[in-house]
Amino acid sequence: MFLFEYLPNELIINLFDYLDDYDRYVSFDGLNQRFDKLLLYVTHSSWFTVNFSNLHQSKFHRVCKFMKSEDTRSLTLSNYRHSVHINQIPLFFNIYFQLDQLKYLQRLYLYGIDDNQCQSFLPKLEQLQHLSLLTFKCLTVVRQFNLSARFLSLKTVRTLKFLSDGGQIAFVMDTSPPIIVINHVQYLKINIEK
């Protein structure tokens, strides 16, 4: 008779690599102290990546319920999946987590975000002190975005991507003195698809 619990830690960690973060946690979290420690080791040696962009709505809610905000390093949310409106961004931040709970978040990808959601997110992003990559993909842009007032205040962001499906995007740089020098952004991508 073979028992899974008798496998050496190294082999179990290798098996964990074949599972995504969600399946690994649902299957092994809380089983016993040994598996909890191995999960903690795997989480801290890689980092917890949560990509909701291709999840069905039912799995989205299950992931949100088990997800630990302090372990999350990368988060991908999308309001659309295969052209179907699923509204993940407001669901995630209004029901499950506040932005400031994601203290160690390093990468944030928001796809299919509308103009109002984008405007409401910008002031709150300053709370994320470890955020180094930020990607917004907007459906349409109605209002102008003031880059200097919002994006440039994000001192930890090194990569900033602003994408648009609507074929238009408007940026305004605050030209009032003093002139703002962007010295912390290493990569800026603005993509407009027509």
Image (spheres, rainbow, N blue to C red):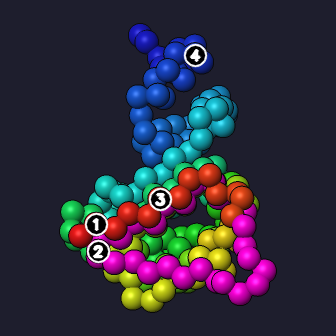
Which residue is disc 2 drawn over? Answer: 167
Give yes or no for contact between labels 1 and 2 (Cβ–Cβ under 8 Å): yes
**Badge 3 amino acid:** Lys
Lateral position of residue 57 relative to residue 174, left or right: left
Segment tinted magenta in the rendering: 155-181
Picture quadrant where residue 181 is located: bottom right
Q: Which of marks 2 and 4 is nearer the N terminus?
A: 4
Q: Main SS of the magenta segment?
A: loop
Closer to us: mark 2 or mark 4? 2
Lateral position of residue 49 relative to residue 56, left or right: right
**Badge 1 amino acid:** Glu
How far apart are labels 3 and 1 at the CA level?
Answer: 13 Å
How far apart are labels 2 and 4 at the CA level?
Answer: 50 Å
Say the numbered circle drawn on residue 10: 4
**Badge 2 amino acid:** Gly
Question: Residue 121: where, in percent of width, then height?
Answer: 56, 77
Question: Residue 165: where, in percent of width, then height?
Answer: 30, 70
Q: Can residue 23 be seen in this view?
A: yes
Q: Is mark 1 on a helix, strand or loop?
A: loop
Say the numbered circle drawn on residue 193: 1
Give yes or no for contact between labels 4 and 3 (Cβ–Cβ under 8 Å): no
Q: Is residue 112 visible?
A: no
The N terminus, quarter of image: top left
Lateral position of residue 83 relative to residue 104, left or right: left
Q: What element carries label 4?
A: helix
- 10 Å crowding of disc 2: few (<14), some (14-19), many (20+): few
Q: Which residue is drawn at 54% across and 82% down?
A: 172
Position above or below: 36 against 51: above
